[in-house]
């Protein structure tokens, strides 16, 4: 985000229009909401937030267009700035990398597997695990605990859960798994893994996992590669979130949503356990042919790139 103000400076110097792509909100009110955890980062977080307050509006006001992965982020900008009208922004989700799967198969040929061999049903996840995902993790672990009580052997593996270098990351799952009584069924490696290895992991796992955030506007980039992997997929998301809506449109995942009601997480955990039983029995993830065609046609990397080019062309035309 610290680099984004350069767009306005360059425009003042050279007259070149600039487009900003917001994959996450620059100024985020998540930690100001009731019940939110303490913000991470200490003084670094406070400096970043001050930077956002001072520079977000100044930078975006002269921006030719804003691309966002979530309508919720654009709506927040419209509430903050009266001049930010609908024509200032477009929702452009992450593209599904169809060609990358060929590269994964080529590079993984003859390599040892990433996931450990196991007699249990393996669930795998690669990517960030923040405190905003705590409730989704609690629902998952409640489901794993119930499944084990029924005699169904399931284990979960998490990779690349922090942005730390090798050996420096802290576990996000340890305390939550212990609280649910499933520590022995959960492993976590916080060290980042490469993008291609995260795709390769999807080819090896028995069940792929997608987790939602308490930030209802969150749109995970891993959603589209995960759906393209074609593996049984379990998705856990807050009710009325962007992720819940996207999965309703695209299918391809067993969706378990939860609310903030006192017993909602335990109820959702029961639904997770039910899906684990169904996956163990050989049931596939629900997705209609129309949804599968839409994923490959409308959400492909090529289709998204074409829409990006349209945005660039509009921005250039408007600057003349």
Image: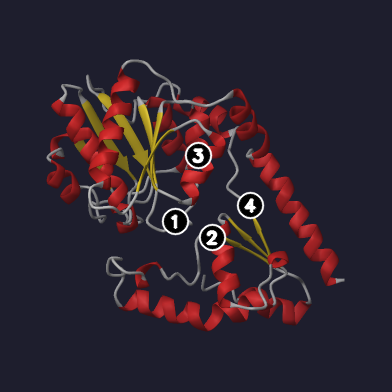
Write the residue at 32% across / 42% down: 159
Label 4, label 1: how far apart the Cα atoms are: 17 Å
299 or 167, which lies in front?
299
Q: Secondary structure at mark 3?
A: helix
Task: Point out the tag, 1 or 2, that comes first from the N-terminus.
Answer: 2
Question: What numbered label is drawn on residue 92?
Answer: 4
Task: Point out the tag, 2 or 3, that comes first from the N-terminus.
Answer: 2
Label 1, label 3: how far apart the Cα atoms are: 14 Å
Q: Secondary structure at mark 2?
A: helix
Quick check: marks 2 and 3 in contact, CB under 8 Å?
Answer: no
Quick check: marks 1 and 2 in contact, CB under 8 Å?
Answer: yes
Question: What numbered label is drawn on residue 72?
Answer: 2
Q: Is residue 155 above or below residue 174?
A: above
Local crowd at mark 4 within 10 Å, few (<14), some, or many (≥20)? many
Question: What numbered label is drawn on residue 216?
Answer: 1
Q: Secondary structure at mark 4?
A: loop
Label 2, label 4: how far apart the Cα atoms are: 12 Å
Label 3, label 4: how far apart the Cα atoms are: 16 Å
Question: What numbered label is drawn on residue 247?
Answer: 3
198 or 312, which lies in front?
312
Local crowd at mark 3 within 10 Å, few (<14), some, or many (≥20)? some
Label 2, label 3: how far apart the Cα atoms are: 16 Å
Task: Point out the tag, 2 or 4, that comes first from the N-terminus.
Answer: 2
């Amino acid at each position: 985000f610290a680099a984004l103000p350069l767009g306005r400076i360059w425009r003042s110097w050279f007259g070149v229009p600039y487009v900003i792509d917001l994959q996450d909100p620059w100024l985020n009110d998540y930690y100001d909401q009731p019940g939110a955890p303490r913000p991470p980062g200490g003084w670094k977080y406070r400096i970043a937030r001050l930077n956002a307050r001072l520079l977000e509006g100044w930078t975006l006001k002269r921006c030719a267009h804003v691309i966002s992965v979530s309508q919720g982020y654009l709506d927040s900008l419209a509430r903050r700035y009266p001049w930010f009208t609908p024509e200032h922004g477009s929702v452009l989700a992450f593209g599904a990398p169809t060609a990358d799967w060929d590269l994964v198969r080529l590079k993984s040929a003859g390599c040892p597997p990433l996931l450990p061999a196991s007699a249990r049903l393996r669930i795998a996840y690669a990517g960030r695990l923040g405190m905003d995902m705590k409730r989704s993790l609690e629902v998952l672990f409640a489901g794993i605990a119930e499944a084990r009580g029924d005699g169904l052997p399931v284990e979960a593996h998490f990779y690349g859960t922090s942005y730390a270098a090798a050996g420096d990351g802290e576990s996000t799952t340890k305390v939550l798994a212990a609280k649910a009584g499933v520590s022995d069924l959960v492993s976590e490696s916080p060290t980042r893994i490469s993008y291609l290895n995260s795709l390769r992991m999807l080819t090896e796992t028995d069940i792929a996992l997608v987790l939602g955030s308490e930030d209802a506007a969150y749109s995970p980039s891993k959603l589209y590669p995960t759906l393209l992997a074609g593996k049984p997929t379990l998705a856990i998301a807050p009710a009325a979130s962007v992720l819940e809506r996207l999965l309703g449109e695209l299918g391809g995942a067993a969706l378990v949503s939860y609310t903030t009601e006192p017993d909602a997480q335990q109820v959702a955990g029961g639904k997770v356990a039910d899906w684990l039983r169904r996956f163990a029995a050989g049931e596939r993830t629900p997705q209609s042919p129309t949804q599968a065609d839409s994923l490959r046609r409308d959400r492909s990397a090529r289709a998204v790139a074409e829409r990006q080019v349209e945005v660039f062309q509009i921005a250039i035309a408007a600057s003349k």
